Structure formats: structure tokens, C-alpha cells
Amino acid sequence: MMQARKINGIGYLTGNWPLDRHKSTIVFIHGVGGSGLFWRLQIDSLTPQVNTLAIDLPGHGQSDGEGMDAIEDYAYSVIDLITTINVPNPIPCGISMGGAITLQILINHPDSIKAGILINTGAKLKVAPVIFDTLANSFSEYLEMMGQLVAAENTDKKKIKLFKEDTAKCKPEVILRDFQACHNFDVMQQLESIPLPVLVVSAEDDQMTPPKYGDYLVNAMPYASGVHIPAAGHILPLEKPENFNAAIAEFINDNDL
């Protein structure tokens, strides 16, 4: 049963507590303006197989702070939580900005984790000027624009509404810092150094990080494998939870994690 906890100003959700020391722990990392609640359809579903923990990054959800404008800083905050609560066999799993954070952890802290899972993300995440402009001019217009960009055409509108409501709880200035962090992120030249197994999940109808981003990651990392999920967009874990959860479970099994 999902429960909320907080330590040193950082909030997180977990499907089981205390964490089982004999299992791996998937550490879910949300995207821009999100929170650990984004992973509500994964936390309890995957708990029978692994420990599940979804972090609220600084300035998001129940966490203190005002957000950060560098992916490396967010990566350190995740590693700090992993270390503080002694997470067993951690596997960071991030979407979009959270995927960038996961990549940074894979590059900078490979000895602290077991593997990585990347969803709808890239090694370089330039942000379109229209996103910055809309966010600066009108938060409500920004939310409407995101609602049109983040999901596949046939996605249940209730899921899009849920995503928008969660995002609306985040301060616009924190979202701006998130996008600045993404815009300055570029680890294209470092991917071949990643020494761990990595699952790359892409979605057929992702308008923000098209499948070619995932293909590049799979080809550039020595121990990467890819899964492509049809009829889904950028918020894939909300849109197609069964397919997504099954891909994670298979990755865990195939790599004896």
C-alpha cells in the first residue's frame, strides 16, 4: 500500500516500508513540474517484485526548496536520498527530465546503483522557445499547451487532466528552472562510458522526445536495450501502465536484478 514519507526535507512515496534488503529498489524520478505521484500506477503494481520508491525532487511535491537549474544538482539530490535511507540495490528510473537525471547518475555514480531505466528522454534536451515564452506569459496557457503535447491522440482525457492537475501544483518558477536544467543538458559524448545495463523505453506518439531519441541512446550505450510502445505519448507510464510495467518487470528478470 503506497505511503508517503519525508526525510531531510525530501518527500517520497514507497510501496513498502521498510524496504526489503534482499530486493532491488526502483527509484522513480519524475519529469518537469511533476512529483512522485506521477508514478502512482507503478508503485503498488511492481512492489511484489521489487521495492518501489518515487522521489519528489527539491521544490516539487512534498519536498522543500525552490527547484534547481542543473541536472547534475538534481542527480546529487537523488543520490543523497539513496544514501541517507540506505536504499538496497537502487535502480533509478526516470522520465523526460527524470531520464536526464538518471543518465547523469549512470555517468557520475555508477558504483552507487545497479542499472538504469530511461523513459522518453534523450542525451540532449533542448527546449523549444515557445515553451519558455508561454510559461513566462501565462501559466494557464502553458498547462493547456502541455495537455496537447504530452499524450497520444486516443489517450483517455482523464489521464491528461490528472497530469495537468499535478503539474498545476508546482510553482511556475520551479518549472522554469526545470526547463533551464533540461535546456543545458548534454551528455552525448559520455554515453559509451556507462558500464551498467540500461532499459530505454520510447513511445510511438511522443511529440516532445520522439522515438529517435531513444534509438540514439540504445545505439550509444554498450549495455542498453530498447522497448518501443505503440499508441502512447510522452506520459507513457500514465497512458499505458500495463505495457510499461511489464517492460520493467521483464528487464528486471532478464538481468537478474
Image (spheres, rainbow, N blue to C red):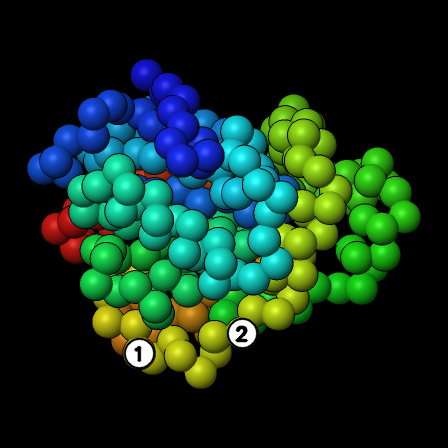
Look at the picture and state if 249 lies above or below 95.
Answer: above
Where does the N terminus fall, quadrant-wise?
Answer: top left
Would you say residue 31 is visible in this rendering? yes
Which amino acid type is marked by label 1? Ser
Look at the picture and state if 48 lies above or below 224.
Answer: above
**Residue 230 disc label:** none
Quarter-of-image position of residue 23 = top left
Would you say residue 250 is visible in this rendering? no
Identify the residue at the far front of this view. Answer: 8
**Residue at (36, 61) in percent of width and height:** 105
- Looking at the rendered structure, the secondary structure element under dot 1 is helix
Residue 122, x across and y down, in percent:
52, 65
**Residue pointed to by mark 2:** 186
Nearer to us in this view, 58 or 29:
58
**Residue at (74, 42) in percent of width and height:** 172
Quarter-of-image position of residue 114 = bottom left
**Residue pointed to by mark 1:** 193
**Residue at (62, 44) in percent of width and height:** 66
Look at the picture and state if 65 lies above or below 201.
Answer: above
- Quick one: label 2, few (<14), some, or many (20+) residues within 10 Å? some
Residue 155, x across and y down, in percent:
63, 35
Q: Distance between the residues labelled 2 and 1?
A: 14 Å
Which amino acid type is marked by label 2? Asp
